[in-house]
């Protein structure tokens, strides 16, 4: 099973059809080659194996990111008590 973390587009290279996304503070490049809809800087997307798969709403992205932050915090707290 693959869990895709919402990523925010921070730049778009139209010539190469790629974008730079921010995923919980980490930036990386992703291809826009298989995405059917238009995206803009600031949009949230889901990525799989380096390709933007779909665009998601800001609200959905923020809900998901909050859950991921809670999971990371819980794991860190567990590690501190081990």
Image: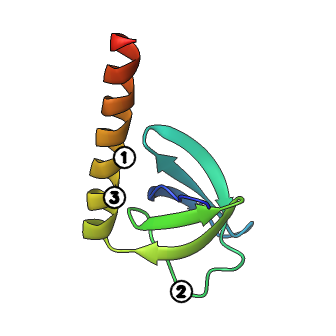
Give x and y (percent) for residue 4.
53, 59
Seen from this angle, which residue lies furthest bottom?
A: 36
- Horizontal side of 21 relative to 63 (left or right) equals right
Disc 2 + disc 3, Cβ < 8 Å: no
Residue 31, relative to residue 5: is it above or below? Answer: below
**What residue sits right under mark 1 in the picture?**
68
Query: How far across and how far down the image is residue 18, in percent?
Result: 67, 63
Which picture quadrant has residue 6? Answer: bottom left
Tag 2 secondary structure: loop
Q: Is residue 30 left or right of residue 6?
A: right
Question: In the image, residue 3 lies at what x, y percent?
Answer: 53, 58
Q: Residue at x 39, y 29 (%)?
A: 75
Mark 3, Cα crowd under 10 Å, few <14 / some 14-19 / many 20+, is some
Q: If you read the primary sequence from the N terminus, does the residue marked by circle 2 or circle 1 appear first?
A: 2
**Callout 3 secondary element:** helix
Give the number of the mark in front: 2 or 1. Answer: 1
Element carrying mark 1: helix
Res 69 → quadrant = top left
For disc 2, the marked residue is 37
Closer to us: 46 or 17: 46
């Amino acid at each position: 099973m693959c869990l895709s973390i919402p990523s925010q587009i921070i730049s778009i290279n139209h010539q190469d059809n790629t974008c730079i996304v921010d995923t919980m503070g980490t930036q990386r490049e992703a291809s826009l080659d298989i995405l059917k809809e238009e995206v803009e800087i600031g949009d949230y997307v889901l990525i799989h194996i380096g390709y933007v798969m779909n665009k998601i709403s800001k609200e959905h992205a923020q809900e998901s990111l909050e859950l991921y932050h809670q999971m990371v915090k819980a794991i860190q707290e567990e590690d501190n008590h081990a």
